[in-house]
Image (spheres, rainbow, N blue to C red):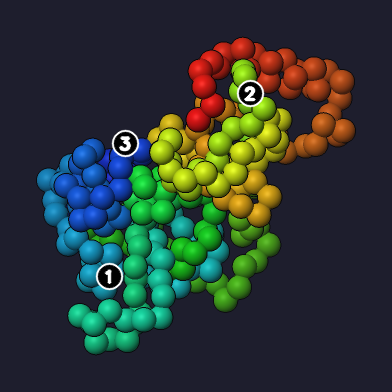
Amino acid sequence: MLDAKKLIASVEECLGWPYVSPGTNDSRGIDCSGLFVKAYRDQGASIYHGSNTIYRKYCSEKGKLTNVSQLKPGMAVFKWNTNTPEKFDDGLGDFQHIGLVTSVNPLRIVHASSAAGCVTTDTKLGKWTYWGWLKDVAKNDSLPPTPAEPTEGDEEPMTEFATVIADSGSTVNMRTKAKSTAALVERVPLGARVEVLGTCGSWTKVKFGSRTGYMMTKFLIAEDDQEPDEDLTLEERVTRLEKRVAMLEAYDGAVG
């Protein structure tokens, strides 16, 4: 049996690797199921390259995903649509994308994303709609039952925010993919507050207003707490301000 902790470590070390399909399953390029091929190979094992086959044949337990309480570290998750690929005749639909849950609280799903152009993380369920426990991966206890609907305490993890910073200019570029040559989504003003959706190596997936994209992580300061400034004491406000000033002084270079 494979060690779930080692499986998690194997995919985490791939963050920032370029997305290439089918790829070489290493730092030169990797796709979503290739991430699992690499992680299995690191433990001297093998798994089929293909998220549809992994869901159908390599999961000992699986089901519909409705809330975070169903997840465990080391579990595979899938994005799905209704159209079953031609090579299958079971009518189960298309399990078109696969990722690995590396943490539940806070939620962290690592996957090789064609949209991001690299191995990245998600911090919300979003379109992840099915779960599966890989039959070759050891686990200590059984999966929780699938609830019909979320119950109290099953809410999504608290939203993370960051402040946009730079030591020059007035904006920072938000791009469609995690690379400096990707198309521009928006120029985000310095001091703006963005929602953090995931990481991709030295890039962070963010939401600003109604638009999402990638910004270089060095131009963001993560907020340590969720209280608005008006709810803080004077001492807490000063501490937060000093921390932001220190971070600003630490960064240099051109805006990404």
Tell me which numbered mark, 3 or 1, is placed earlier along the sequence. Answer: 3
- Is 1 situated left or right of 225 in this image? left
Q: Is residue 39 visible?
A: no
The residue indicated by pointer 2 is: 169
> Which residue corresponds to the image point at 61% horizontal and 59% vertical from the top-left?
154
Disc 2 crowd, CA 10 A, few/some/many (<14, 14-19, 20+): few
Is 124 on the left or on the right of 246, as rendered? left
Residue named by callout 1: 52
Nearer to us: label 2 or label 1: 2
Find residue 202 and name its label.
none
The residue positioned 20% from the left and 80% from the top of the image is: 87
Residue beneath the point at 27% across and 70% down: 52
Residue 58 drawn at (x, y percent): 23, 66
Residue 92 found in image quarter:
bottom left
**Viewed as shown, does residue 203 lie left or right of 76?**
right
Q: Amino acid at mark 1?
A: Asn
Q: Is residue 190 above or below residue 181?
A: above
Residue 246: horizontal and vertical position, in percent? 64, 13
- What amino acid is labelled 2 in the image? Gly
Q: Residue at x 26, y 73 (%)?
A: 56
Q: What whole-number distance in Å separates the C-alpha atoms at marks 2 and 3?
A: 33 Å
> How many tags in the picture?
3
In x, y percent, where is residue 234? 87, 20
The residue identified by callout 3 is: 13
Q: Identify the amino acid type marked 3.
A: Glu
Question: Counting residues from the N terminus, which is met first, the one under dot 2 or under dot 1?
Answer: 1
Residue 241 lies left or right of residue 28; in this view the side is: right
Query: Disc 2 and disc 1: Cα gap in Å?
Result: 47 Å
How far is disc 3 from disc 1 in space, using C-alphas?
24 Å
